[in-house]
Image (cartoon, rainbow, N blue to C red):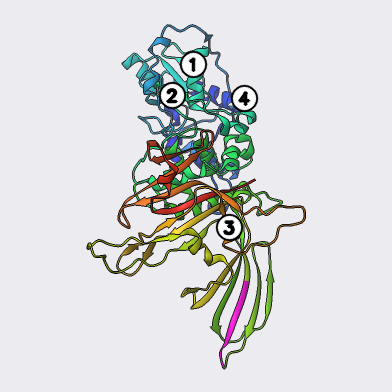
Amino acid sequence: MESSRKRKPELDLEEEEEEEEEEGGGGSIPVLAPYSDDDENDNGVAESEAPMEEEEEEEEEVGFQKPAAPRRRQVEVRRDCPYLDTVNRQVLDFDFEKFCSISLSNLNVYACLVCGKYYQGRGLNSHAYTHSLEAGHHVYINLQTEKVYCLPDGYEINDPSLDDIRHVLNPRFSREQVLHLDENRQWSRALDGSNYLPGMVGLNNIKETDFVNVTIQSLMRVTPLRNFFLVPENYQHCKSPLVHRFGELTRKVSPHEFLQAVMKASDKRFQIGVQSDPVEFMSWLLNTLHMKLRHSKKKNKSIIHDCFQGELEVVKESHKKPLIEKKESNEEQNKMVTVDDEGTNGVVKETSTVPFLMLGLDLPPPPLFKDAMEKNIIPQVPLFNILKKFDGESVTEVVRPCIARMRYRVTRLPKYLILHMRRFTKNNFFIEKNPTLVNFPVKNLELKDYIPLPPPKENMKMRSKYDLIANIVHDGKPGEGVYRAFVQCKSEELWYEMQDLHVTETLPQMVALSEAYMQIYEQHE
């Protein structure tokens, strides 16, 4: 970042050289570079691969002279420190962006373990050093290397009593721990002394970001996806900051840095302070993560598609001039176009096989009249009725990009099925919300009873039964209101209602008594 580079001369030069050696010296903890260093530019080339001459020119502009060889400064390491009893765990919060509270730089940032504020550097002219003299706060942790120092004395503190702080700063999970997470019923204790159940922690609504919170809370119920991102080695080859910030968010509650990565990756399509649709955000997030994670040899292979991708057969009938029969085939979809003559203008029938990550369900229109008590009638519809859209026979009429009749049939089911109820419709004047309640089973949704499915392959069982694991609902008027989520805790087999920071246990019956907007179902093994 330009602003960060311009502030480099303020730091002690020897300290910078030492920190660079520490961070690149074969440690077991992978350190992520700032956004500007490993993000991709418009040409798809990592900026870190750009010619070095540009960086040298910029450094010369601000008077920074690159040393011929790094000089390592010896730092005393002590186990005993008289100021350890001043550490105040209740004020520590590592969820904020790692920027100095004074210079706003993200280089060599330390957290004061006495007041919790972030400061840059620890050299004689640094903000952390100055803070230690002015406030009398002496214990600081480097937010990247996790080393703890005593200022202004400058020695490193090596004391096991600080390990709990390091774990909160950068949680680590072994593959063995990850495999047994869904069996854990033990509550944990936070630094401030409060108790929480791992996986059931609320997310702060920074400003109109509840659409992000409910999406993240729902995705964290998808076990393979969660387990993949809990182990950074699974995606260490990926240069996308969004992928690494999503991984950090999976391991600990850090929505601030994740939202910054979202704003940059989406070109501010989704941003803090602007309410957005969780369905649109879910679709964008899954597709973007897939694009960043997919393997070079298998272009369409990623953890996202392993979990969520299904397949549809789409038959489109439209009135057009007769077209020549053609075939088109690639990895994404296969098409066969046929023509049935009807007078001068033929009916063009186009059959496509297309992948999907979520299925959109159409709600019946609500009644226009009130009942005898002068109250609006809120209709209800069984989920099975609106699922008939995908039976291969029901016709859906569309007007864009042209007037056509569509028929859909599911040809392959995903491991995790995402359903989206189309509650909101836009016209030239306002957004209208359909209040129809959908009646759905929380357990044992058997799809083969309601839509035709292809027969399983040899020696394979039909896997068409699903259990609900997450349900996102919308409360309030269209264009306003708030989002909340009902999620299942597998270890306890209980349901929780999550609305930003508020997490409360609820009954399974209450899950179905809400205006469901988006749901995630898990396929039976």
Q: CA distance from mark 2 to mark 4?
A: 27 Å
Q: Nearer the viewer, mark 3 or mark 4?
A: 3
Of 329 and 243, which appears nearest the observer? 329
Whether residue 267 is visible: no
Residue matched to label 2:
190
Marks 3 and 1 close (CB-CB < 8 Å): no
Residue matched to label 1:
162
Of 373 and 177, which appears nearest the observer? 373
Q: Residues within 10 Å of mark 4 (few under 14, many from 20)?
A: few
Q: Secondary structure at mark 1?
A: helix
Magenta segment: 344-351
Q: CA distance from mark 1 to mark 4?
A: 19 Å
x, y percent for residue 165: 47, 21
x, y percent for residue 513: 39, 50
What amino acid is labelled 4 in the image? Gly
What amino acid is labelled 2 in the image? Ala
Residue matched to label 4:
27
Q: CA distance from mark 3 to mark 2?
A: 42 Å
- Please report whichever mark, 3 or 4, sits nearer to the chain's N-terminal start: 4
Q: CA distance from mark 3 to mark 1?
A: 52 Å
Q: Main secondary structure of the magenta part?
A: strand
Which circle marks residue 447 in the picture?
3
Q: Nearer the viewer, mark 1 or mark 4?
A: 1
Q: Residue drawn at (26%, 65%), measured in percent from left and top?
A: 371
Q: Nearer the viewer, mark 1 or mark 2?
A: 2
x, y percent for residue 108: 47, 27
